[in-house]
Image: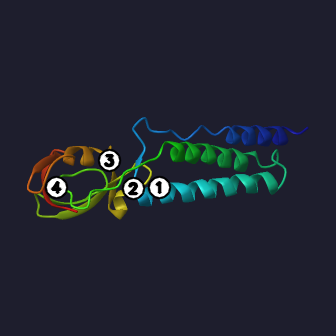
Amino acid sequence: MSVAFTRENDLEATAADLPDRPISLHPNLVTARGLAAIDAALAEARAAYGAAQTEGDVQADRTAMARATRDLRYWSARRATAQLVEPPEAPETVQFGVTVTLLREDDRRQTFRIVGEDEADPAQGSVSYVSPLAAALMGKGVGDVATVAGREVEIETIA
């Protein structure tokens, strides 16, 4: 057997030994939208797993099978631990599931929705409830001031 084939097989074996995706130690709080996203990701992981099993020899593409198995384990665990939290209709304080608008010291306004860890996407205006930003705001009301990243922000609205 050629050294090239041995090395290629070794690289494939290494790639197939993917570590599990880390699962947070925090409670898995989710919004309704977050729960739907977990369900969609779980369905996608199941489909990828099924495809990896049927599309050929598992030994020939161990990386695809390892990735599909890892994702299936992760999303199954996240779905099993998901705790749906419905936001209050008229929130008076910052809490999970609400949208909060902040006024920064430089007069910039920023609006964020506080969501679960898997749903968080700051570029899309959502932050995890365990993020430093959310932690600084939790329990505060309109007009309250919080320190975020060493700077003060004022809570302008809560919805």
Name the amino acid, label 2.
Thr
Q: Label 4: how many residues lie within 10 Å, few (<14), some (14-19) or many (20+)?
A: some
Q: Secondary structure at mark 2?
A: loop
- Rendered image quadrant of residue 106: bottom left
Residue 2 pos. (x, y %): 88, 39
Q: Disc 2, disc 1: CB below 8 Å?
A: yes
Q: Nearer the viewer, residue 137 or 124?
A: 137
Question: How far apart in space, not on screen, are marks 4 and 1 (Cα)?
Answer: 25 Å
The residue to which callout 3 is attached is: 129
Name the amino acid, label 3.
Tyr
The residue to which callout 1 is attached is: 35
* Mark 4 / mark 3, whichever is N-terminal: 4
Q: Secondary structure at mark 1?
A: helix
Identify the image quadrant of the N terminus: top right
The residue to which callout 2 is attached is: 31
Name the amino acid, label 1.
Leu
Identify the disc placed on residue 92. Answer: 4
Residue 138 pos. (x, y %): 22, 46
* Mark 3 / mark 2, whichever is N-terminal: 2
The reply, left or right, for residue 59 in relation to residue 148 is right
x 68%, y 56%: residue: 48
Q: Nearer the viewer, mark 3 or mark 1?
A: 1
Name the amino acid, label 4.
Glu
- Rendered image quadrant of residue 143: bottom left
Q: Disc 3, disc 1: CB below 8 Å?
A: no
Q: Nearer the viewer, residue 78 or 117?
A: 78
Q: Nearer the viewer, residue 16 or 114?
A: 114
Q: Disc 2, disc 4: CB below 8 Å?
A: no
Q: Disc 3, disc 2: CB below 8 Å?
A: no
Residue 150 pos. (x, y %): 16, 44
